[in-house]
């Protein structure tokens, strides 16, 4: 049964230097055609299940005008929504307005994920972003006032020459806001980004580790509990949509570059806007064997701090987790722990989770979190 849907809006008013997401510059004349194609794709793939979480991501969904936003929400009216739906939209502070927030509320949005990334002017410039702290406060206050109380803020750290005190200032500012969720990402220089082309290098691993631990400590002290490698929330405000991914459950993904997990297949859509508009949606399709599914279960499930419930694993795959993977060996090396029927990565090894996760598929990693 599919209960989650991701919808991709690729348009951005500005392209950030680190960005590896499927995105294109906002082009007024393309948007209607894109939304029509999205509507066509939705009608083609969606089998009318009751959906429990919808996540509109991007790109920058808030870059759409009011009229375009209405068109998007009208398209999504076709989706049967459960009473308790978690309905998220991503937004940037540059393009959000009170009118757009009113519209979000009207169409049932109950969670907003804002890209803030950093408050430091020097680093904002490096990331090719802008931010007004005054506007951030106004927007969050307004969203709360109108009843959208489930709010995430994205933070990026680990920019070259970023100092610990600058990271702490970012955290202080974010913690001063009335929000429920914080996602943190260490800057990774991805190929095909402006930073990669400019030969920018990742920061020293020791500093990266130190920053990660500072974030974990400070957020914990402020009642944000860590439930995933990079995600923290107030109790009860975990992202139900993202938990679909980490629980290795099925989901629809529609739009440019979106991924789906349906019918035992992992499908990735094209990143070419021309192909997408020609309705040539699929770029790759991977048919999963039972072994593949078990590997996904491990590499996704162990991102959760509480880990994988052994009983659930057995129910899903009709075999014990230890029959599939050398759990004992990893426990001996103190890379995994077991408690209360759950297998999980110990707190002091979270930083090297990539290495641990890769042991389930073979290979090695640089150890940085993603
Ligand atoms: S990071 Fe977000 S806002 Fe920036 S270019 Fe990428 S998708 Fe657009």
Image (cartoon, rainbow, N blue to C red):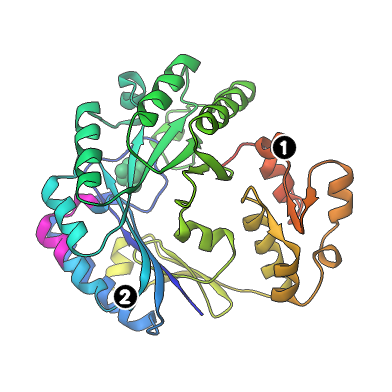
Residues packed near mark 2 inside 10 Å, few (<14), some (14 to 19) or many (20 plus): some
For image coordinates 46% across by 19% down, the residue present is 162
Q: Earlier along the polypeptide chain: callout 2 or callout 1?
A: 2
For image coordinates 70% across by 50% down, the residue present is 357
For image coordinates 42% across by 18% down, the residue present is 166
In the rendered image, the quadrant that contains the C terminus is top right
Relative vertical location of residue 41 with respect to residue 367 in this rendering, above or below: below
User: Dividing the picture into quarters, in which one does residue 132 lie?
Assistant: top left
Q: Does the magenta stretch include residue 111?
A: no
- Percent coordinates x, y for residue 260 in the rendering: 47, 69
Is residue 357 left or right of 30 when viewed as pictured? Answer: right
Overall secondary structure of the magenta stretch? helix
Relative vertical location of residue 117 with respect to residue 8 in this rendering, above or below: above
- Percent coordinates x, y for residue 326 in the rendering: 86, 57
**Circle 1 residue:** 349
Find the distance from the CA under tag 2 to the CA under tag 1.
44 Å
Is residue 192 left or right of 87 when viewed as pictured? Answer: right
**Circle 1 — which element?**
helix
> Would you say the residues marked 2 and 1 are in contact, meaning their CB atoms lie under 8 Å apart?
no
- Percent coordinates x, y for residue 264 in the rendering: 59, 77
Which residues fall within the magenta stretch? Answer: 62-70
Relative vertical location of residue 100 with respect to residue 115 in this rendering, above or below: below
Q: Quadrant holding ligand 1?
A: top left
**Circle 2 residue:** 279
Q: Which of 157 and 336 is in front in this view?
A: 336
For image coordinates 72% across by 43% down, the residue present is 355
Q: Can residue 38 be seen in this view?
A: yes
Is residue 106 left or right of 280 when viewed as pictured? Answer: left
């Amino acid at each position: 049964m599919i209960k989650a849907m991701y919808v991709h809006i690729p348009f951005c008013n500005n392209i950030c230097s680190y960005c590896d997401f499927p995105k294109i510059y906002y082009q007024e004349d393309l948007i209607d055609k894109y939304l029509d194609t999205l509507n066509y794709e939705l009608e083609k793939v969606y089998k009318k299940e009751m959906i429990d979480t919808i996540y509109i991501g991007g790109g920058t969904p808030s870059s759409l005008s009011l009229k375009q936003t209405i068109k998007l929400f009208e398209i999504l009216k076709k989706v049967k929504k459960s009473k308790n739906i978690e309905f998220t939209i991503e937004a940037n502070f540059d393009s959000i307005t009170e009118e757009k927030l009113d519209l979000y509320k009207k169409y049932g949005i109950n969670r907003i994920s804002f890209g803030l990334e950093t408050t430091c002017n020097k680093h904002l410039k490096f990331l090719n972003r802008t931010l007004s702290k005054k506007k951030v406060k106004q927007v969050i206050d307004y969203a709360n006032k109108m009843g959208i109380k489930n709010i995430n803020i994205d933070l990026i750290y680990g920019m070259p020459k970023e100092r610990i005190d600058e990271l702490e200032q970012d955290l202080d500012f974010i913690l001063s806001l009335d929000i429920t969720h914080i996602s943190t990402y260490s800057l990774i220089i991805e190929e095909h980004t402006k930073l990669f082309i400019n030969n920018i290098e990742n920061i020293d691993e020791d500093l990266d580790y130190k920053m990660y631990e500072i974030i974990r400590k400070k957020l914990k002290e402020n009642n944000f509990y860590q439930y995933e490698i990079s995600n923290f929330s107030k109790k009860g405000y975990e992202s139900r949509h993202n938990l679909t991914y980490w629980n290795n459950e099925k989901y629809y993904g529609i739009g440019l570059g979106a991924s789906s997990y349906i019918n035992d297949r992992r499908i990735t859509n094209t990143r070419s806007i021309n192909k997408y508009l020609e309705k040539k949606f699929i770029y790759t399709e991977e048919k999963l064997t039972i072994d593949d599914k078990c590997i996904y279960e491990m590499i996704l499930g162990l991102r959760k701090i509480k880990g994988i419930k052994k009983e659930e694993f057995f129910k899903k795959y009709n075999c014990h987790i230890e029959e599939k993977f050398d759990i004992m060996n990893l426990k001996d090396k103190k890379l995994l722990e077991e408690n209360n029927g759950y297998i999980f990565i110990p707190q002091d090894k979270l930083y090297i989770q990539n290495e641990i996760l890769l042991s389930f598929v073979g290979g090695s990693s640089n150890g940085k979190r993603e």
